[in-house]
Amino acid sequence: GLIDSCWSAGHLSGSSFQKSFNEHYFLPEPVKMIVDHYPEKDKYQLLDKKMSIKEFSEAAVVKPGLWNAGLVLVYPTKAAVECKGEETFKFGGASKAEVTCHLTHIGKTVKTRMPGTTHTSCDGDFFNIIIHFPKKGDYEFELFAKPIGQPGSYPMALTVLCKANAANTQKFPKGYTLKPGERLVGPLNAGLKAKSSARFEFVSPTADKMAVSYAGKWTYLKRNGHVFSADLSLVSGKSGVKLMASYPGGNQFWTRYEWNVV
């Protein structure tokens, strides 16, 4: 078996050691240990197909948080990827985990967080994360994950360097943590036009009621199986729009997404 008792005990914070137990490095599967431990002798990889040092150096930077949440990396598998204006990252294990993510633009002197540039949805047991790069350049994508229902913060799960060679300026609506199997069908644009009509459609296997809150009024969505939908006339841009859901066993509505009316 494979063990790293040092990394299991904690980590460095500046020049001081911080105790922080992590059982991931006690007898992990070889395919998980090879992500951040490359032995001097190939035989200690304990893999049927050995990984080269080139493959190791180019592999995606996976953290224990990914495995601990029950996620499986589908794409990207490299630490750096060439991207167009839109890219989709995919992870298995959506029935087990809650995720959140950040996209940060890497400038010459500063890094800038880019809100509204990622959209997460569930497709069966997979998370699909759509990313829009507002301008050409380098970006850092960070994924955070934890098991469903686990209290506390979201540990780091993955970092990827994205090299965007095209731009997509469309922003996504502000989203909150989704339950397994949930996804927003539309609208996917953060800004909704005043004096127009918008169709709201959301898929949820677990919600029992859904409503849109706008200009002080609630419009309940019609349900057809797991699909909730409603058409809403947007009169003015003085009020934002919220899509909310309630679940069996409670009488509280939880915000799923928010839009601006412009």
Image: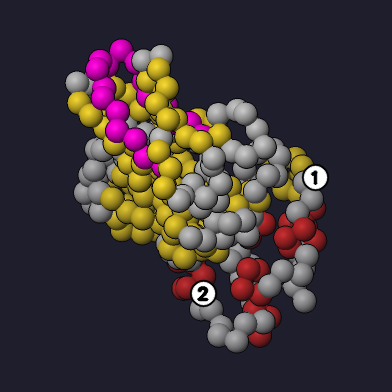
The image's colour scheme reads secondary structure
For marks 1 and 2, give the CA distance: 31 Å
User: Closer to the camera: disc 1 or disc 2?
Assistant: 1
- 157 lies above or below 28: above
Q: Is residue 218 magenta?
A: no
What is the number of the mark on residue 117?
Answer: none
Q: Secondary structure at mark 2?
A: helix
The answer to whether residue 106 is left or right of residue 248 is: left
The quadrant in which residue 239 appears is top left
Q: Which residue is mark 2?
A: 53
Q: Residue at x 24, y 38 (%)?
A: 169
Q: Is residue 234 magenta?
A: yes
Q: Is residue 18 visible?
A: yes
Q: Residue at x 29, y 33 (%)?
A: 231
Question: How many discs mark residues in the rendered view?
Answer: 2
Which range of residues does the magenta coloring cover? 228-245
Q: Position of residue 91 (x, y in %)?
A: 49, 60
Magenta segment, principal secondary structure? strand
What amino acid does circle 2 point to? Answer: Ile
Q: Position of residue 62 (x, y in %)?
A: 56, 59
Pick whichever, 218 or 99, lies toward us.
218
- 43 lies above or below 159: below
Q: Secondary structure at mark 1?
A: strand
Q: Residue furthest left?
A: 195
Q: Which residue is mark 1?
A: 19
- 82 lies above or below 202: below
Q: Position of residue 164 (x, y in %)?
A: 28, 50
Q: Mark 1 packing: few (<14 Cα in 10 Å), some, or many (20+)?
A: few
Q: Residue at x 54, y 31 (%)?
A: 254
Pick whichever, 255 or 89, lies toward us.
255
